Each structure stands twice: as C-alpha cells, then as structure tokens.
Image (cartoon, coloured by chain):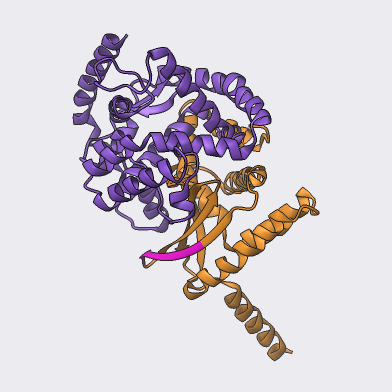
Chain colours: A purple, B orange
Amino acid sequence: MRVLFAIFLLVSSIYAVENIGTSTYIGTSSVNNSATEYNSFDEEFSVKNTEEEIDPLSGYNRLMTEFNDVFYIYLLNPTAKGYSCVAPKEARLAISNFFENLFFPIRLINNLLQFKFQNSLEETERFVINSTIGILGFMDVAKDQYNINPHNEDFGQTLGYYGVGSGFHVVLPFLGPSNLRDMVGIFGDSWANPISYIDSRSANLLDSDEESIYATSFHVINKASLHLNEYENIKKDAVDLYPFLKNFYESRREKLIKE
Amino acid sequence: MRYFWIVCLTALLLAQHASALEESAIEPFMKKNVEVVASIIRDKALKEDIKATKIFGIFDQVFDYTTMSKISLGSVKWKELNKSQQDEFSRAFEQKLKNSYMSKLNLYTDEKIVLGGMQKINNTRIQLLMTLFKNNEKYEVIYKFYKTNNNEWLIYDVDVLGVSIIQTYKIQFAEFLQKEPFEKLLEKLKNKES
C-alpha cells in the first residue's frame, strides 16, 4: 500500500512539474488597460495561486468528495451525535485537550523548523504545565490560568513556509481536501504523531497499527462531536460542493502558512 | 415655494451624507452594531423572521450586495447580462447570502466577540478584524470595506477563517457556468434548499 502511494506521489509530482510551464501564463491575462472599480475587484479576486487553476484530478476529486460526503453525513456524524448524547461536553473537551497535548511533538518540531522560537518555547511550557498540573493534559491550565495559547503548525505549513507550492488539489478518502504539499506533510506529521504506529520509529507509544487506528478514530469522533452540524451547515452554502470545499481548504491553508 | 424645495433638497442631501459611513465612523459603527446584532441573536423570545428583519436592517446599511454580485460573477460575465438580469441576479444572491447567514445563527451561542484592529490597505480599502472565541478555539472574521465614488465606505466581502466568502462563490459560479447556462445558475441560487 505504501509503495503504491509513493508511486502515485512520484507520478503526480512529475505531472506537477510539467504543468508549471503552462501555469505561469494564467496570471498575466487578467491585466487590463482601464483601471475601473470592477477591474480592480477582478484583480483582487483573481485566483492568486495559479496552481489552484490546474486540477488534473478533478474527476477523481469530485467522486471522492461525494464519497467523503456520504461517509460524513451517514457514518461519522451520526456516530459523533450518539457519542455526544452519552458523554457530557466537559468530558469531550477534556478528551480533546488530552489529544491536543499528545500532539505536542508535531507542533514543537514545526515551530522550530519555521524558526518560531518564542512559539516553540510557549508550546513547551504548555506541554509541561498541562501534562503535570493539567493532569496528563486533560485540562488546559496553561491557557486558562497562565494565558499561554497553543501554536498549531504542521509539516504542510512548514513546507509552505519554505516556499513549496501547494501542487494540485487532491481529495483524500476520509481525510478530505488536501494537495500534494500537504500530503507530504501528512507523512511528516504521522511520523511525529505519538498516536500513530510506525515500525521504523524507535519509540512507539502504542503497540500496533490496530491500537493506533482505534485511538485515532476516537480522537476523530470526539473532535467531530465538538463540531456537530458545522459541516452540514457550511455545505448548504455550496452551489457546487467540490469547488466550494476546494477553495475553502486552499484559502484556509494559505492563510495558516502566512501566519 | 422654490426656496422651500431647495431647503428640502439640501436637507435630504445632508441627511444622506450623514447616514453614509465615513472612514472615522467605521469602527464605532461596527462596534456598536456587532453588540446590537449579538443581543438580537441571543434574544430567545424573538421569532426567526423578526430577528432577520432586525439584523438585516442593520446589515443593509453597510453591505453592498450589488458590488458583491458583480465581483462574484466577474466583470466580464456581469457586462454580458442586461439590466434586469443583473438586478435579478443581485437579488437572488443577496437572498442566498442572507439565508446562509440566518442558517448559521444556531451555531452561535454566547461566544465572546472582540472587535478591533482596523487596517487601511490602501486609499479605497479598509479591513476590520473581529475575533470570536468558541470552546477553546479562536475564529477570525475580517470585514472588507471599499470606498465608493460618493466617498462612503461599504462592505464588499467578508473573510471567515481566512476564506473569502465572495471568492468562494466566484469560483463556484465560474465552474458552474462552464457547463450550464446563466439561467440555471439563477434557478439554483433561488432554490432555498441548495
């Protein structure tokens, strides 16, 4: 499976390189001679990232968007809803805090890689405070008492920080919208993620892939239970779901990388 | 008699000028009205449609729906349409935006809202940042104002979590219109369920 994925990545990155030549032209065509109000708006709202215009996988992406939509509406959401009836919100927030505290290595490494030393320090402070006074991270004492806020960074953002373009858009099964850069990022993150199980890694918190899948699923369901109805609600705004989610994801990632 | 009309006309012009939002008035206006809107939303005794009327009574003073419609279609497509098509589209799009807003009100409970940080991008663009705190997360909303030819400031777009609402529609409309005619798009916008 991993080999297959690697081949896919390789092939798609070759495709991306081939397309760079053509993509550079897109931006210039919108330059107009008259500087009226609309034209300035057109320019402001033109798709800044030319890579967004290239969508070689659009057919597959549309299909996968449908698949994820069904998965979300008929499986994840009902599960999260049922779970939220059983577990009170305080408990779910505490569990969410616990997982976020565990993901500390991902945030630390990526803050460091982006030379955000102040943030790295604060992240470390948070981890130390929350793991101890916050009882294994179930309570976010660092934020509530000491006003130290988290600084989320992942490998996809780090790659973006170093100028790696997003590459074309790929919708992943279950995970949803992504792109070439962030797919590479997901590999990096899973390596630094304490609840993933990787054979070649010297230290593993969990004992097997199976345990890792359970832990991750629990985290996902718990997280979904804190964001119930949000997806359905946002989805209602879509005239066309695939470009809607694609734009949403790419703009959001761009913003996160800039921060 | 003629004098009377002149006075009336001048008064009217002055009144209009007073209601138009000037640069210095943006922040106080928004600060006041974000509070007002939040209290309307929180008021459980109010019926949905009365809430809508009250909220949009405030929004309509600063939101420029026609410009939003123009931007979302792009100026090339916009110019292809005749006046009545433009109007029809603007109205449908305005309604779509309003419906979308109203459907999100139940997501809002009692989050803390902090308004602040007006940033002048250039002579005709100003952005105002609003931060919403929910659970233990922070959500950023940016109101984007432009200066009209009458020197008043109106909102032409809103960024939510770094995602421009109008841009999102623009991309969808462009993709939709590649395959379907304009009338289909209009139909789709008017369909409340979509």
In this picture, residue A161 sits left or right of residue B134: left
In this picture, residue B181 sits left or right of residue A83: left
Q: Please report the residue visible at 60 percent of the width from the left and 46 percent of the height from the top.
A: B97
In this picture, residue A208 sits left or right of residue B100: left
Q: Please report the residue visible at 42 percent of the width from the left and 35 percent of the height from the top.
A: A249
Q: Say if residue B60 shows up in the picture.
A: yes
Residue B186 quadrant: top right
Label the magenta part by its dominant secondary structure.
strand
Depth check, front residue: A58 or B127: B127
Q: Please report the residue visible at 63 percent of the width from the left and 63 percent of the height from the top.
A: B35
What span is colored magenta in the figure? B115-122
Which quadrant of the figure contains the N terminus of chain B?
bottom right
Number of labels in the image equals: 0
Location of residue A79 with respect to A28 vertically, above or below: above
* Residue B117 located within the stretch drawn in magenta: yes
Q: Please report the residue visible at 65 percent of the width from the left and 79 percent of the height from the top.
A: B12
Residue A185 quadrant: top left
In this picture, residue A64 sits left or right of residue B5: left
Depth check, front residue: A183 or A147: A147
Q: Position of residue B93 (x, y in %)?
A: 59, 44
Residue B53 quadrant: bottom right
Q: Position of residue B127 (x, y in %)?
A: 43, 61
